[in-house]
Amino acid sequence: MTTKKDFTKPTRREAKLTARLNGIVNQFPSGDTLRVDGTLFTKADLQAKVQSYLGAETAARQGHVNQLALTKIKDANAKPADQFLVALGQALVSYYGSGDHKDLEGYGVTPPRKPTKATSAQNVVKAAKASETRAARGTVGPKQKASIQGATPASVNVTVAGKAVPTFKAVKGGGSTPTS
């Protein structure tokens, strides 16, 4: 299991280096020397050596903090930037025209392709699909709709309540419509 490091806090090494540097600055006598790993250091030399290590640690941690902040900004800008790039590409095609390949390529924009014309075989398949769809849905054109007419009532009786009740002609085949 990996855990995310908190780069806002100093690492253990950075904390130790900071403590050593504070000790050197505040407590180590100025005229004394200290032998570390066989090398003799004065207060200034010791302070410079610790500071060189501490500077690298601090800079690396600060770099991580900056990277995290910049990555958040970049991620937040991703969608608006992509939308703007699409809109800008469309505006450039509109400005230069879709046939001006040279100028559009200067912006890194590929002009839109013209759709290929359907072959006669594709047109036949398209028409067959359309007629099958119309048949399946039962749709008809305006002329066929105009020829469809509802039955006209033979007479209309108005009752006392003011409701109109149509009376239809007898239907062929012996059936009749109920009248109330």
Image: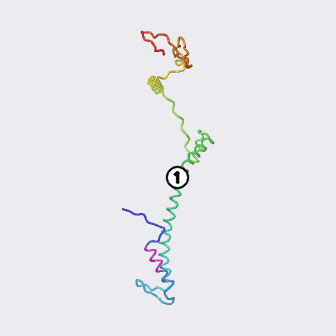
What type is the residue that disc 1 sits on?
A: Ala
Number of disc labels: 1
Q: Position of residue 67 (x, y in %)?
A: 50, 62
Q: How is the image coloured?
A: rainbow
Main secondary structure type of the part rendered in magenta:
helix
In the rendered view, tell whether residue 44 sits above or below residue 53: below
On screen, 98 above or below 40? above
Q: Is residue 170 magenta?
A: no
**Residue closer to the observer: 112 or 138:** 138
Give left or right: position of 69 versus 13: right
Residue farthest along the left direction in this orientation: 1
Q: Residues within 10 Å of mark 1 (few under 14, many from 20)?
A: few
Secondary-structure class at tag 1 = helix
Which residue in the rendered view is the most extreme toward the front? 160
Could you say which is closer to the camera, residue 9 or residue 29? 9
For this orientation, the residue located farthest to the right is 95
Reading the image, the residue beneath label 1 is 78
Q: Position of residue 98 (x, y in %)?
A: 59, 39
Q: Does residue 19 show up magenta in the picture? A: yes
In percent of width and height, residue 163 lies at 55, 19
User: Which residue is pictured at 43% across the width and 86% down the height?
Assistant: 35
Above or below, comparing residue 90 to residue 54 in the picture: above
From the image, which quarter does the N terminus lie in? bottom left
Q: Residue at x 46, y 22 (%)?
A: 138
Occupied quadrant, residue 104 = top right
Residue 62, position as x, y percentages in the image: 50, 68
Q: Which residues are magenta?
A: 12-20
The residue nearer to you, when weighing 21 against 173, is 173
